Image: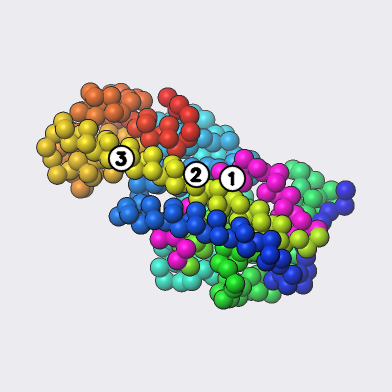
């Protein structure tokens, strides 16, 4: 089959069928609002839900072919195994960690800048630092033609040919202007922005991950969510063919409406799934808080539980070094959590080597199955 070429002069779309979209906008907006109500009720939602942020990085990277699991990323973070012990898996894990770091870097920049090319380039620079693709101009737009298809395919064998490099500067500037356009509906605007970014494929590598990262950033920056804690990649990873096919039809036939329908359905479903998982995590947080409070009278209990929710696999020395908790108190709380089975010992302490512990109940919620 011949490649599909970028829809030159087809952006922004002029023929959206709003009659098809209106019945989907309401449910998606309401699901998002319900989820935001949950986030707004928690003072530190982004911190408490940070394992979901890492899981989003895992799933978004998996769409591009990495194989790392959430537990492996957290084990690597905690030093349970090293790059030397498993170099190939460590490469996948570093891509996931870079995704998480790029998201945090973008959030830092958005405190000063709007969503713009500067933020995108800086986030891309972090995303591609020290991983496969690091030699492919991190933070710089491509100056040559690229294409999408099976690994190693020629341009003639490709599935999709993005905008040519000569037209890219003007095309990405037009994309940036559309970010700040007052559009009829923000969710539809986001659907269009995501599809266009993927079609432009402005970098030599990392475009898919960066394009999906822009979804929670846009929701947060435009006020649709009070926190950037939105996790869309689970839907796209489950329905990878549907995701890519609907994106491709934008350029193949100019069918923006079907893509927008697909996107609105994904937002509605994922907002409900995000809310369900967030409720489980917050319920577990409160339950664990009560359990530890029954064991010890300490003002540091909240900080202790916040720590293990943020880092569900951790070194005991990092827990003890937490500046919010006195060292003696931290050691006592850590021992109590071990003794009562709230934590699983993944590696015992030995000499100067600290013990490593896992908050199994939280990991099981985030992964959706028994982890260990």
> At 42% from the left edge and 71% from the top edge, which residue is drawn?
112
Q: Which residues are magenta?
A: 223-252
Of tags 2 and 1, the one toward the viewer is 2
Looking at the picture, does residue 271 appear above or below residue 362? below
Q: Judging from the image, what secondary structure is the residue with disc 3 in? A: helix
Q: Which residue is mark 2?
A: 273
Residue 301 horizontal side relative to residue 343, left or right: left
Q: Is residue 157 magenta?
A: no
Q: Residues within 10 Å of mark 1 (few under 14, many from 20)?
A: some
Q: Residue at x 55, y 60 (%)?
A: 26
- Pick the front one: 107 or 242: 242
Marks 2/1 in contact by CB < 8 Å: the verdict is: yes
* Foreground residue among 93 and 254: 254
- The Cα–Cα distance between marks 2 and 1, rounded to whole angstroms, is 10 Å
Q: Is residue 135 visible?
A: no
x%, y% of residue 253?
81, 60
Q: CA distance from mark 3 to mark 1?
A: 26 Å
- Residue 235's disc number: 1
Identify the residue position indicated by label 3 in the image.
Answer: 285
In the displayed structure, 135 sits above or below 197; it is above
- Across and down, in percent, residue 12 comes to 69, 71
Quadrant housing residue 202: bottom right
Taking depth in this image into account, of 132 and 220 the one nearest to the observer is 220
CB within 8 Å, label 2 to label 3 = no
Colour setup of the view: rainbow
Q: Nearer the viewer, mark 2 or mark 3?
A: 2
- Name the main secondary structure of what is drawn in magenta: helix
């Amino acid at each position: 089959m011949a490649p599909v070429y970028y829809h030159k002069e087809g952006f922004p779309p002029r023929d959206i069928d709003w009659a098809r979209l209106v019945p989907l906008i309401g449910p998606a907006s309401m699901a998002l609002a319900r989820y935001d109500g949950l986030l707004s009720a928690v003072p530190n939602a982004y911190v408490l839900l940070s394992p979901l942020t890492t899981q989003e990085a895992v799933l978004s990277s998996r769409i591009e072919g990495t194989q790392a699991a959430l537990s492996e990323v957290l084990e690597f973070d905690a030093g349970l195994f090293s790059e030397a012990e498993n170099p190939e898996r460590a490469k996948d894990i570093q891509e996931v960690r870079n995704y998480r770091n790029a998201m945090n870097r973008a959030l830092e920049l958005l405190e000063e800048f709007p969503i713009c090319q500067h933020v995108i380039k800086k986030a891309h620079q972090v995303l591609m630092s020290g991983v496969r693709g690091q030699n492919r101009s991190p933070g710089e737009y491509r100056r040559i033609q690229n294409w999408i298809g099976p690994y190693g395919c020629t341009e003639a064998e490709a599935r999709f040919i993005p905008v040519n490099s000569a037209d890219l500067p003007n095309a990405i500037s037009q994309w940036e202007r559309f970010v700040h356009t007052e559009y009829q509906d923000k969710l539809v605007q986001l659907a269009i922005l995501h599809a266009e970014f993927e079609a432009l494929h402005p970098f030599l590598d990392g475009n898919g991950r960066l394009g999906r990262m822009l979804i929670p950033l846009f929701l947060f920056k435009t006020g649709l969510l009070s926190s950037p804690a939105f996790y869309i990649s689970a839907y796209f990873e489950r329905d990878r063919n549907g995701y890519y096919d609907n994106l491709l039809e934008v350029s193949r036939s100019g069918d923006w409406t079907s893509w927008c329908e697909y996107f609105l359905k994904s937002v509605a479903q994922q907002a409900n799934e995000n809310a369900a998982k967030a409720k489980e995590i917050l319920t577990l947080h409160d339950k664990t808080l009560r359990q530890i409070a029954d064991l010890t009278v300490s003002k540091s209990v909240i900080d202790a539980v916040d720590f293990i929710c943020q880092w569900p696999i951790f070194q005991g020395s990092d827990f003890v070094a937490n500046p919010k908790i006195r060292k003696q108190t931290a050691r006592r709380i850590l021992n109590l959590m071990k003794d009562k089975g709230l934590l699983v010992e993944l590696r015992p302490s030995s000499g100067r080597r600290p013990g490593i512990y896992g908050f199994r109940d939280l990991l099981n919620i985030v992964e959706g199955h028994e982890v260990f």
